[in-house]
Image (cartoon, rainbow, N blue to C red):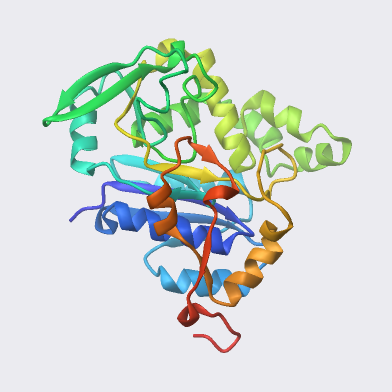
Amino acid sequence: MNKMISNIVFTKNRPLQLEAYLDSLYRYFPAEIIKTYIIYKVELFTEEYESLFRKFPDCVIVKETDFHSDFMRILSDVDTKYILFGIDDVVFFDTVNFELIDQIFQKYGENIFGFTLRFSPESLKDGGDIIDEYSVAGEPVYRLNWKQGRTQHTRYPFELCCTFYTTDLVKKVIYGSMNGSSLVKKLFGPSSALIKVFEKTGWKRSTLKRFGYFFSPNTLESWPCRWCRSNSEKLPDYTYFQKLCASAIQVNMVNTTTRNDHDGTDEHTVEVLNDKYKNGYRFDIDYVAEKRPSEPGCGRQYFKLKKCEAQTISKSSD
């Protein structure tokens, strides 16, 4: 079967959580149609990450050197119809038949921005959004107009957690949100000598933002999303969905430049969780599937570990 989805995942200091992301993804979506790229920020827990990558040999591992260049190189290589982004603290707990998703894109291609796993009619019932219901292949499918979104989630069209986009649309958004001048990119791109000087003066972020040159997963999400809102007339109107199938379980933080809420305690620091990971503890995907989060982001009440002795990582592991 030909690959249809390029899954581009971002990770830093969370091997235990990344394994849960990959295990849950492949539990609910067929691995044979997915080509996964992992942009891996090398900092802590190298041995654990290397052990994890051996478990998933079909993944393309990109050790981050310059985030902007690394991502753009992957995007230029993508030859699948769809792109699904991923963050290492996301866990899948249900599925939508991918053949159905593909049919929806074919049927509503001119007005579909993306098909998301973040929403369900129940999760949005109190938000005030107008939700339209359709039937595709005998199954109920829903949509909302993100340009008229009433909540912080529904008016946020471009996100890196669990929404399927066409590759053509992703490229349109990414290239559209960046200044296209080769001279500007040479002078003000993330790896330029001038930006390295600006980093010492505190001007780096504001300069890159002005020209749309993202330099991290957070800026890759937020700056193109801002461009989408400012250029909404150039983009399809609707986010389609069927049911909530995945959630970011936010118990720790690895990004220190952008504020992210989390609901963890001292037992959820990346160091503590990595020690657990080395000693055979793994995220309990079954527990999340049983409890079924009702929001696209949730906290520690869904974060459970279980001991798997055969998974213990040691320096002698192959």
Residue 76 visible in the displayed image: yes
Residue 43 visible in the displayed image: no
x then y, percent, for residue 215: 64, 41
Above or below — where is 291 with respect to 142? below
Above or below — where is 133 with respect to 254? above
Number of numbered tags placed on the structure image: 0
- Judging depth in this view, the residue of 265 and 42 nearest the camera is 265
Q: Residue at x 38, y 51 (%)?
A: 289
Q: Residue at x 53, y 25 (%)?
A: 225
Q: Residue at x 64, y 62 (%)?
A: 42
x then y, percent, for residue 282: 51, 67
x then y, percent, for residue 131: 33, 16
- Quadrant of the image occupied by residue 107: top left
Q: Residue at x 49, y 39 (%)?
A: 160
| Residue placed furthest toward the right | 201
x then y, percent, for residue 313: 56, 80
Q: Which quarter of the rendered picture does the N terminus lie within?
A: bottom left
- Quadrant of the image occupied by residue 22: bottom left
